[in-house]
Structures are given as C-alpha cells and as structure tokens.
Amino acid sequence: QVLLVESGGGSVQAGGSLRLSCAASGVIGYCMGWFRQAPGKEREGVAAISRYGNTNYLDSVKDRFTISRDNARNTLYLQMNNLKPEDIAMYYCAERPRCYSDTSLSKAVFSLWGQGTQVTVSS
C-alpha cells in the first residue's frame, strides 16, 4: 500500500505563500487531491488532479492555489499564494486508486490519506 507524507506547512502572514508537498512511497498513477480540515469543520476538498493533469478547485481557492504532480518523483504539490486567515487548516493529500480521469473533490471517493500538515495564516 502506498504511504503518503505531507510537508511544507507552516505559519505565514496574510498574502504570503506556501508550497505543500506530498511524497508517496510508491507510484502515484491515479487521481489525487488536497483536502483541508479546520477545527470544528468538515474536511473539504481543495484541489484535485487526474492522472492526465486535469484539475478542479474549490471556488474559494481558484486563482490562488495550484495543484500539480510529478509522477517521476512520485510527488504531489499544492502551491498556495495570497493566503488568507480562512485558509487556516490541517492539509491532507489523498489518492484515489483506480481513478484515472475524474477530478471530484468529494472526500468519500478517496481511500488513501496522509497524516496532514498544518497551515496557519496570521492577519
């Protein structure tokens, strides 16, 4: 089973940037996504990417966040620009085995999860 390990979280001021990475212990050939969960809230899909590079974003992060993947390095990325206090959350990467082209942001269809990395934004 593939293990996913996130890194790159931290604390920044509003308007700042962070790049999250998700390193996989094996090949990441399927659909993948980034999710976040703020205290007291449900986990929500932030961005998803298909095996072929098609992407989908949560409305509130469009034009600020960019998901990408480097299949040769078995790594998923999330570039986050113009961060806002409402982006504060634990961020998780996830893989959806046997998915090739879908970019759903539903957490219900993802079955492999990392442990998360915390993002904090100060105003």
Image: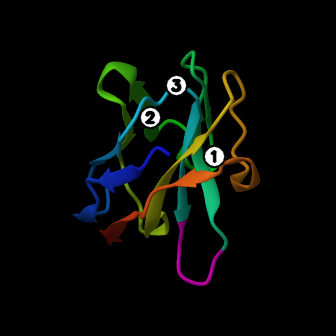
- First along the sequence among labels 2 and 3: 3
Query: Which numbered dot is residue 58?
Result: 1
Q: Is 97 left, or right, of 26 in this rendering? A: right
Q: Position of residue 30 (x, y in %)?
A: 58, 28
Q: Amino acid at mark 2?
A: Thr
Local crowd size for mark 2, using a 10 Å CA cut-off: few (<14), some (14–19), many (≥20): many
Q: Position of residue 76 (x, y in %)?
A: 40, 36
Quadrant where the C terminus sits is bottom left
Q: Secondary structure at mark 2?
A: strand
Please provide the residue range marked out in magenta: 37-41
- First along the sequence among labels 2 and 1: 1
Asked if residue 22 is positioned above or below residue 54 in the image, the reply reads below
- Distance from label 2 to label 1 (Cα)? 11 Å
Is there a contact, CB below 8 Å, between mark 2 and mark 3?
no
Q: Nearer the viewer, mark 2 or mark 3?
A: 3
Residue that badge 2 annotates: 66
- Distance from label 2 to label 3 (Cα)? 19 Å
